[in-house]
Image (cartoon, rainbow, N blue to C red):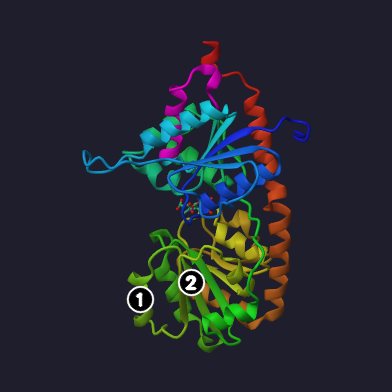
C-alpha cells in the first residue's frame, strides 16, 4: 500500500522507557513516524531515554504512580490505562501502539473499554520476546496476554521465529504480522581512537558484548568463551552492561579475565562504542531478534552469535557474521579466533553486515510497514461502534 497520500495519523505509543531493545525500537519508531508527518504521543512512567527533547510532533505524557501504602506492590496497569484513555480522548488518537504485551496490551484494552466507540483508537500490540517466551508460559500471565492479543486490532512480532513461538506458547490463532526491528544510528561523538583511549586499550581487537545481562544472555558462557580464546593478548572484551555487572566479577576472577574484560554500565549512547568495535559477541540461549547484533552490523561490525531464536533471520551465517549452535564455549571461541586471525574475512563480513542492515533493517525499510498497518486498521469500523 502506498502511504504517501494518506492523511497523517495521531498515534499513541507505550513502551518501557529504560534501556532495553523494545523501548529503543518503540522510541525510534515514534521519532521516525513524527519525521514522516504523524503526531506521536508517548505514554509511560518516564520519558524514554532516547526520545529527543525538542522534536516537532512528539509529545510525552507521564503516568503518575502514587504509593498509597495500601498495597504491598504499587499498581501501574490501572493508572496507565486511565492515562491512555485520557490521551486517546483528548488528542483523538487513531492508533495506540503498545510495545511488550505485559502490562501494556492489557492496559490498552482496558482503556478502550473506558471510552465511547467514536473515541476509541485502534490498538496494535507488538510482541518483543520474553512477553511470549517467558511470561507467556506463566499461568499467572498467559491468559491475560492471550486476552489482550485477541482484543487487539493487530498483533505484530519482531521475527518469524517469535510469530511461531507465539502461536505455540500462547495458542494465539489470530493474524500476526511480522515486522522486523530496525536501527537508525545516531552520529558518533568520539573517534575510534578516543573511545579506545577512554577504555585503556591499545591496538587489540575489540570484542563487544552489549546486553541487559538477564539469565538468557548467558554471561557465564560469554566469559567462558573469552577464557577459551587462545590468543588472549590479541583482544579485549568490552561489555556494555544494561544492569549491574558486579555479580559476574567472581567468574571474571575465576577465569583469570581481569585484564581482558572491560565493563561499562548503563551507557545510553552506544554509537561511540559500536564505531570502535571489531567483532560482536552474543551467547544468548534465547533471542527473538537481538537488536545488539543489528546495532553492530550498522557499523560494519560482524558478530559471532549463537544460532538461536530469530538470530538467523538477522545474520546470514558466513556472509554477514558467524553463527554457532548454542551451548559450546569452544565453538564460539574458535569462531572468534577465525575473525581475529583473518582480517579479510572480518572486513568482508562487516561490509555485508552493513549492507544488510541498511537494505533490510533500516527505518526506510521498516517504518512504512507500520504505517501501512496503521492505515489499514484505521479504516476498519470499530466493532463496538456497530453493535
Ligand atoms: O524480552 C526481553 O527480554 C526484553 C526485550 C527488550 O526490551 O530488550 O528484548 C526482546 O526484544 C528486543 C527488541 O525487539 C529483541 O531484540 C530481543 O531479542 C528480545 N529478547 C529476547 O527475546 C530474549
CA gap between label 1 and label 2 equals 12 Å
Label 1 residue SS: helix
Q: Is residue 372 left or right of residue 270?
A: right
Residue 71, which numbered label?
none
Q: Is residue 153 visible?
A: no
Q: Over which residues does the magenta segment extend? A: 103-121
Q: Quadrant of residue 113?
A: top left
Q: Quadrant of residue 212?
A: bottom left
Please report whichever mark, 1 or 2, sits nearer to the chain's N-terminal start. Answer: 2
**Residue that lies at the very extreme toward the front in this rendered image:** 54
Residue at position x 59%, y 77% in the image: 195
Residue 239, which numbered label?
2
- Tell me where residue 235 appears, x and y as whole percent: 55, 83
Question: Label 1: few (<14), some or many (≥20) within 10 Å?
Answer: few
Q: Quadrant of residue 191?
A: bottom right
| In-front residue for pair 368/170 | 368
In the image, residue 386 lies in the stretch drawn in magenta: no
Residue 249, which numbered label?
1
Question: Label 2: few (<14), some or many (≥20) within 10 Å?
Answer: many
Label 2 residue SS: strand
- Tell me where residue 267 appears, x and y as whole percent: 50, 66
| In-front residue for pair 93/154 | 93
Residue at position x 53%, y 23% in the image: 120
**Residue that lies at the very extreme toward the top in this rendered image:** 387
Q: Is residue 369 left or right of residue 142?
A: right
Q: Is mark 2 within 8 Å of ligand 1?
A: no
Count the numbered circles shown.
Answer: 2
Amino acid at each position: 500500500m502506498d502511504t504517501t497520500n494518506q492523511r497523517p495519523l495521531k498515534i499513541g505509543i507505550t513502551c518501557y522507557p529504560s534501556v532495553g531493545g523494545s523501548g529503543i525500537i518503540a522510541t525510534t519508531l515514534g521519532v521516525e513516524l513524527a519525521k514522516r508527518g504523524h503526531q506521536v504521543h508517548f505514554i509511560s512512567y518516564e520519558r524514554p531515554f532516547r526520545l529527543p527533547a525538542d522534536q516537532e510532533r512528539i509529545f510525552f505524557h507521564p503516568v503518575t504512580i502514587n504509593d498509597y501504602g495500601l498495597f504491598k506492590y504499587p499498581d501501574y496497569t490501572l493508572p496507565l490505562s486511565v492515562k491512555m484513555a485520557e490521551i486517546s480522548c483528548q488528542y483523538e488518537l487513531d492508533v495506540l501502539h503498545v510495545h511488550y504485551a505485559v502490562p501494556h496490551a492489557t492496559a490498552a484494552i482496558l482503556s478502550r473499554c473506558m471510552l465511547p466507540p467514536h473515541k476509541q483508537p485502534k490498538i496494535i500490540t507488538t510482541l518483543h520476546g520474553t512477553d511470549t517466551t517467558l511470561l507467556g508460559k506463566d499461568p499467572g500471565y498467559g491468559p491475560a496476554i492471550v486476552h489482550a492479543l485477541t482484543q487487539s486490532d493487530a498483533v505484530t512480532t519482531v521475527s518469524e521465529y517469535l510469530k511461531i513461538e507465539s502461536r505455540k506458547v500462547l495458542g494465539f490463532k489470530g493474524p500476526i504480522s511480522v515486522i522486523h526491528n530496525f536501527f537508525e544510528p545516531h552520529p558518533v561523538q568520539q573517534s575510534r581512537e578516543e573511545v579506545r583511549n577512554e577504555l585503556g586499550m591499545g591496538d587489540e581487537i575489540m570484542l563487544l558484548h552489549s546486553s541487559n545481562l538477564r539469565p538468557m544472555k548467558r554471561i557465564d558462557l560469554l566469559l567462558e568463551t573469552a577464557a577459551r580464546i587462545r590468543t588472549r593478548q590479541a583482544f579485549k572484551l568490552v561489555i556494555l552492561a544494561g544492569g549491574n555487572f558486579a555479580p559476574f566479577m567472581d567468574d571474571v576472577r575465576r577465569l583469570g579475565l581481569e585484564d581482558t574484560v572491560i565493563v561499562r554500565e548503563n551507557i545510553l549512547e552506544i554509537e561511540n562504542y559500536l564505531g570502535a568495535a571489531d567483532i560482536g559477541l552474543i551467547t544468548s540461549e534465547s533471542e527473538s531478534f537481538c537488536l545488539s547484533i543489528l546495532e553492530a552490523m550498522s557499523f560494519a561490525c560482524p558478530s559471532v552469535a549463537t544460532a538461536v531464536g530469530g538470530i538467523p533471520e538477522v545474520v546470514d551465517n558466513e556472509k554477514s557474521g558467524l553463527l554457532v549452535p548454542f551451548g559450546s564455549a569452544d565453538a564460539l571461541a574458535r569462531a572468534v579466533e577465525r575473525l581475529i586471525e583473518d582480517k579479510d574475512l572480518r572486513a568482508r563480513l562487516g561490509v555485508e553486515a552493513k549492507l544488510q542492515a541498511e537494505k533490510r533493517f533500516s527505518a526506510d525499510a521498516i517504518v512504512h510497514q507500520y504505517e501501512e498497518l496503521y492505515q489499514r486498521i484505521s479504516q476498519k469500523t470499530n466493532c463496538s461502534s456497530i453493535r
